[in-house]
Image: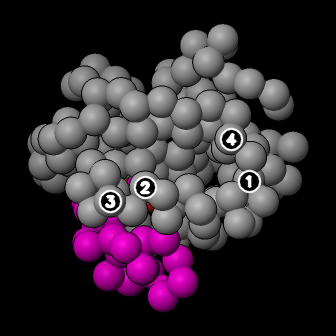
Amino acid sequence: METTVILLKPDCLARKVVGEVIRRFESAGFGIRGAKMMAMNPEMLREHYAHLVGEPFYPLLEAFMMSSPVIVLALAGDGAIERARMLVGPTDSRKAAAGTIRGDMGTDNRRNILHASDSPESAAAEMARFFRPDELFGG
Ligand code: TYD
């Protein structure tokens, strides 16, 4: 069993598709180990998006991620990290296939509904970043 970290971004909440996104993961067999609503702050985002801090679009990304609270999920399953990325689709929602979460619900390459950990190392770092140990169950 593996655990991946999903962030439901402000556009997911604004479009009221939180339930639909969680339903897709549950239908694919994922189990919920942790879930909470939280407000992002610039420090947390600079850590989370360290690979993008120097990009010209970073200020817009930061403003978007702080435009409302987000929902953070820790989801467990066999091969959870890779399987979640497949369900999510590529970064740019306009290029994501129908049937993927971004393809069906996203708008573009910033408003793309959710984040999913991209490797076991990122998943471990994100779990530590967003959850206290007593906020994670099972596993
Ligand atoms: P990245 O880690 O490349 O993609 P993913 O979310 O698919 O793992 O990028 C992180 C986020 O940065 C992405 O979800 C949305 C934002 N972003 C932009 O706002 N503009 C861009 O041009 C790109 C490439 C990403």
Tell me where the magenta segment starts and ends, as one range.
92-114
Mark 3 vs mark 2, CA separation in Å:
6 Å
Q: Are marks 3 and 2 in contact (CB under 8 Å)?
A: yes
**Which label is found at residue 16?**
3
Q: Secondary structure beneath disc 1?
A: loop
Looking at marks 4 and 2 on the same chain, the residue that comes earlier in the sequence is marked by 2
Q: Name the residue: 49% across, 65% down.
A: 20
Residue 121 picture quarter? top right
Q: Tag 3: residue type?
A: Lys
**Which label is found at residue 30?**
1
Q: Tag 2: residue type?
A: Val
| Residue at image mark 2 | 18
Looking at marks 4 and 3 on the same chain, the residue that comes earlier in the sequence is marked by 3
Horizontally, residue 6 falls left or right of residue 109, namely right
Q: Are marks 4 and 1 in contact (CB under 8 Å)?
A: yes
Q: Tag 1: residue type?
A: Phe
**Which label is found at residue 32?**
4
Q: Tag 4: residue type?
A: Ile
Mark 4 vs mark 2, CA separation in Å:
14 Å
Q: Name the residue: 74% across, 53% down.
A: 30
Q: Are marks 1 and 3 in contact (CB under 8 Å)?
A: no
**Residue 58 shows in the view:** no
Quarter of the picture holding the C terminus: top right
Q: Is residue 74 above or below residue 19?
A: above
Identity of the residue furthest to the bottom in this view: 98
Nearest-to-viewer mark from 4 and 3:
3
Mark 4 vs mark 1, CA separation in Å:
7 Å
Mark 4 vs mark 3, CA separation in Å:
20 Å
Residue 78 percent coordinates (x, y): 85, 53
Q: Is mark 4 within 8 Å of ligand 1?
A: no
Horizontally, residue 83 falls left or right of residue 67, namely right
Report if residue 101 lies within the magenta region: yes
